[in-house]
Image (cartoon, helix red, strand yellow):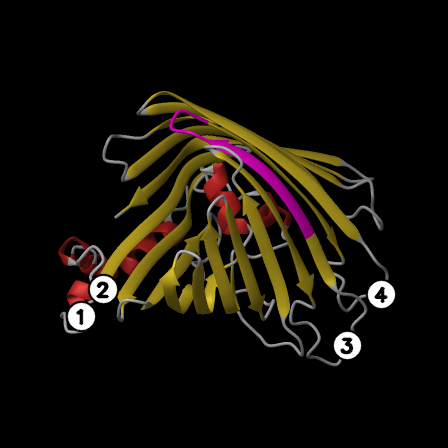
Amino acid sequence: MRHRPLFAALLALAPFSALLPLQAQAASGSADPDAPDYERTRFSSTVFANASSRDGDLDMDLKRFFINIDHDINDVWSAHITTDIQAQRHSEVTDLWARHAYVQYQQSKAFTLQLGAAPMPWIPRMSKLYGYRYIEPTLVSRAGVGSPSEWGVHAKGDAGDFSYALSVVTGSGYKKPTLGNSPDVEASVEWRPAKGWAVVAGGYSGKRAQDNGGLAVEHTARRANLAVGYVSKQFRWGAQGFRASNWGRVTKPGSDSASGWSTWTSYQFVPEWGVFARYDRFEPSRDIDPIRLNTYALGGVEWVPSSSKVRLALVGKHEVNETQARRISSNEYGVWTQLSF
């Protein structure tokens, strides 16, 4: 077992753990501009990790290590930073990324403005609807046709049974942002017809910052999304689907498209114990290589102690990739955890 990437990541960020006790001292929502900085600043951290056997390879992964800093400037303005680092098996520790780095203006729930690297309309909402992001990213992330955060201008709000989100962004992602000649746009609208129910529609359009070089621009990358879900204290169910065109072919001749769908469910039979399952189906190249197909399934049992600071799950995963030449299946099982400080 190779633990060095995991241990290196933890050691590199260990000094930040000294800051975490300040969270207990920070005010819960004080926006008094005359208050000391420590009363207007909150620190927190979240870890996604697992120890698992992947096709016989037993090892550990640090999937995510987030450190969050939230600072209230006054009653309507605030600043937010979330750092992001990973240490996957047989890989070096990644760079320290700024997943979120934005200032926020919020006059009411009906309108929130964020400037900088902030959550995008689709993927973070699906992660919340799904509820088990620490075990696996949701469909659009797995398919590689979207980003959870981007640099740009973001607006969102709630109005009764409806909510909206709109982002005008660079389209290059948050890890290594670059500027293109035109902005990309992602938007979503949500309707909550009854308690616990949500119907969400969204879309994306842009050049993904690939129109700033010497290559000719052949296409615009587009994606359409639809999701429905139900969430209660005991039961959760949902499904989402997408159709994307030319996501990886902005500067390449010849059109291509991709599509996929996912469904999931979970049941808490007692407050501390629950079961969950999920199934994805993804066609990455419907036009150029229509034989290609990815299917993915997972299931498991989760334990959440009353403190809710720890989530622990025993999980099994099965993935199949089919091409014209061969069919490759992969199995993984082990323990996944989410730690919140």
Nearer-the-camera pick, 251 or 123:
123
Which residue position holds label 4?
253
Task: Indicate the quadrant where residue 207 lies.
Answer: bottom right
Read off the residue under disc 1.
37
Dot placed on the residue nearer the N-terminal end, 4 or 2 = 2
Q: Amino acid at mark 3?
A: Leu
**Residue 185 against residue 232 in the figure, above or below:** below
Q: Is residue 233 magenta?
A: yes
Q: Dot 2 surroundings within 10 Å: few (below 14), some, or many (20 or more)? A: many
Which circle's residue, 1 or 3, is located before the other in the chain? 1
Q: At which x and y percent is residue 261? A: 66, 38
Residue hosting label 2 = 41
Q: Are marks 4 and 1 in contact (CB under 8 Å)?
A: no
Quarter of the rendering containing residue 206: bottom right
Q: Rounded to the nearest whole Å, what is the CA distance between mark 2 and mark 1?
A: 6 Å
Closest to the camera, between mark 4 and mark 1, is 1
Q: Are marks 1 and 3 in contact (CB under 8 Å)?
A: no
Among numbered discs 4 and 1, the one appearing first in the sequence: 1
* Residue 192, disc: none
Q: Residue at x 55, y 64 (%)?
A: 167
